[in-house]
């Protein structure tokens, strides 16, 4: 009897295991039809660049990529080495996809950058020399055209409808292996990457490697929702983080390139940073969100509309600004000369500013330019002074230092630090303080006077110039007793 019971139990467990396995298998998506239907519209792209090889590591026969590019390390390690100063024909390989049956193809700009010739190879082995119709370096997109008709095309979807956790699939040519398919899920949305402020990337765990760049990212409906563009890697290979350009942004770039040959973006004209918990408290906010204005560009729409340093932008044209990285794509997607409403918090009070957007300049450094010539003012006697309660040793800037820092008014430089609120806030020697508690600091005496009016135990915003760039920090003042 016990032996029969054991057999029945074992049979039941085996049946349950098979049922669970079958259920799990039924829940996994089937990608075969999607790959079969869309592979004909995915192309391989190879481009040739004629350059003069410069000296130093990183010039090893592969494409010459900028410092910090996710694929740079791969080509540094494994490309052939040539002598510095010699001309060479570099080659870049990537992927792309056909968006219209008369031969328009979308890919990444870095795949065809500085190319003397671009070759497009179709799924049926036909090859074409492609024309670069236009490109947009800021979004890393390029539009190509080949002389062919009746081509297979992809279906354009919507990245805004993607949900985190949703299955997606990439088709491309990693490491030259044609028409490879890899699948994964959407890990996050609205990702901002260094030097890519105007692209709200889709983050996935789809395996993306050199050669996948410019290829399509599909949802389970077989619609293109993104263009595979970047990976984060310490080796040049895939490490679980890949990033795709949202298809809506890409198609907007395509429309502009086809109609005008260039891309124009809306421009507000503010330098921004995130709001952390201490800064939120110091600005009288109930929680940390929004984009804190650290500087207003001279001659910009923001300056004309009356924006001030210390304003916190919380809504743009009706959409909430959750972090500073969400604002640039919102502004950039707007057409030039569009009228918008911007909701801000100033001195703890909500306000709405209406303005007309300008066009984002090519060179923001030029737009920041020299400051207006200040009125002559008596020079203060330079002297070191300690602010014991903050652990700070300060000195008023002289005229020569202000000119070097491109400051039109005073300020104080951090000469020394000791344990206290300043160190805890993240200040460093040689930081220059220009505002405290949203009031201008012209001298050490000004700093003391402003500090004296702040309640003990409160959080106070301080504007600091470090390396020529402004940034807010927050002091937590000591409590009485």
Image (cartoon, rainbow, N blue to C red):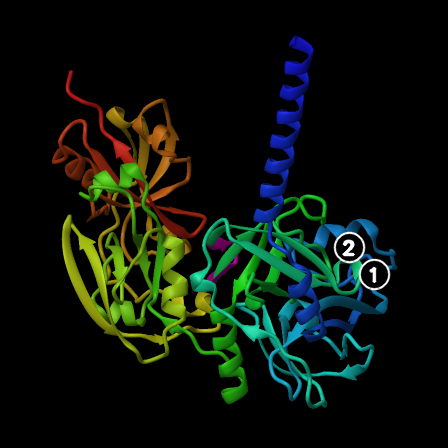
Which residue occupies the foreground of this view, 356 or 317? 317
Residue underneath mark 2: 75
Residue 184 is at least partly visible in this image = yes
Q: Residues within 10 Å of mark 2 (few under 14, many from 20)?
A: many
- How far across and how far down the image is residue 412, in percent? 30, 42
Which residue occupies the foreground of this view, 250 or 410? 250
- How far across and how far down the image is residue 226, in percent? 55, 64
Q: Quadrant of residue 373?
A: bottom left
Q: CA distance from mark 1 to mark 2?
A: 8 Å
- Determine whether the residue tagged by mark 1 lies in a helix, strand or loop: loop
Question: Residue furthest toward the top?
Answer: 2
Q: Quadrant of residue 416?
A: top left
- How far across and how far down the image is residue 269, in percent? 34, 66
In the image, what residue occupies the spot 83% across and 77% down? 125
**Position of residue 175 in the picture relative to residue 350 (left or right):** right
Number of the label disc, if any, that sits on residue 61 = 1
User: Is label 1 in contact with label 2 (beta carbons under 8 Å)?
Assistant: yes
Which residue occupies the foreground of this view, 274 or 230? 230
Q: Residues within 10 Å of mark 1 (few under 14, many from 20)?
A: some
**Position of residue 242 in the picture relative to residue 196 (left or right):** right
**Position of residue 84 in the picture relative to residue 34 (left or right):** right
Q: Looking at the magenta stretch, what is its main secondary structure?
A: strand
Q: Indicate whether residue 192 is drawn in magenta.
A: yes
**Magenta part of the protein: which range?**
190-199
Which residue occupies the foreground of this view, 350 or 431? 350
């Amino acid at each position: 009897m016990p032996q029969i019971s054991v057999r029945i139990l074992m049979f039941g467990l085996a049946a349950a295991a098979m049922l669970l396995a079958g259920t799990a298998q039924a829940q996994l998506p089937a990608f075969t039809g999607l790959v079969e239907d869309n592979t004909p519209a995915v192309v391989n792209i190879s481009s040739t660049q004629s350059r003069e090889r410069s000296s130093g590591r990183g010039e090893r026969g592969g494409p010459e990529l900028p410092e910090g590019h996710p694929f740079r390390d791969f080509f540094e390690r494994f490309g052939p080495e040539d002598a510095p100063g010699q001309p060479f024909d570099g080659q870049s390989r990537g992927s792309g996809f056909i968006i219209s049956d008369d031969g328009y193809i979308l890919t990444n700009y870095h795949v065809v950058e500085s190319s003397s010739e671009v070759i497009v190879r179709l799924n049926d082995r036909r090859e074409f020399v492609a024309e670069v119709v236009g490109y947009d370096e800021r979004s890393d997109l390029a539009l190509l055209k080949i002389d062919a008709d009746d081509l297979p095309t992809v279906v354009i979807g919507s990245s805004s409808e993607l949900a985190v956790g949703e299955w997606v699939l990439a088709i491309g040519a990693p490491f030259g292996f044609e028409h490879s398919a890899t699948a994964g899920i959407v890990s996050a949305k609205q990702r901002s990457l260094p030097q890519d402020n105007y692209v709200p990337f889709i983050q996935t765990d789809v395996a993306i490697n050199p050669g996948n760049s410019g290829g399509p990212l599909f949802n389970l409906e077989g619609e293109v929702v993104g263009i595979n563009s970047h990976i984060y890697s310490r080796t040049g290979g895939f490490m679980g983080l890949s990033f795709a350009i949202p298809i809506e942004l890409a198609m907007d770039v395509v429309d502009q390139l086809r109609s005008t040959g260039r891309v124009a973006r809306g421009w507000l004209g503010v330098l921004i940073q995130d709001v952390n918990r201490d800064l939120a408290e110091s600005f009288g906010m109930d929680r940390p969100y929004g984009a804190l204005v650290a500087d207003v560009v001279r001659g910009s729409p923001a300056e004309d509309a009356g924006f001030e340093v210390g304003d916190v932008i919380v809504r743009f044209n009706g959409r909430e600004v959750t972090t500073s990285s969400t604002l640039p794509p919102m502004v950039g997607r707007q057409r030039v000369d569009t009228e918008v409403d911007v909701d801000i918090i100033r001195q703890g009070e909500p306000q709405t500013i209406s303005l007309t957007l300008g066009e984002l300049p090519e060179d923001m450094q030029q737009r920041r330019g020299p400051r207006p010539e200040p009125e002559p003012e008596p020079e203060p006697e330079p002297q070191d002074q300690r602010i014991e309660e903050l652990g700070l040793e300060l000195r008023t800037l002289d005229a020569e230092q202000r000119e070097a820092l491109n400051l039109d008014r005073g300020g104080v430089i951090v000469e020394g630090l000791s344990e206290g609120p300043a160190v805890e806030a993240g200040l460093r020697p040689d930081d220059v303080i220009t505002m405290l508690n949203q009031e201008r600091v012209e001298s050490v005496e000004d700093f003391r006077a402003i500090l004296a009016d702040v309640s003990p135990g409160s959080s106070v915003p301080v504007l600091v110039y470090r390396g020529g760039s402004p940034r807010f920090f927050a002091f937590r003042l000591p409590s009485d007793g």
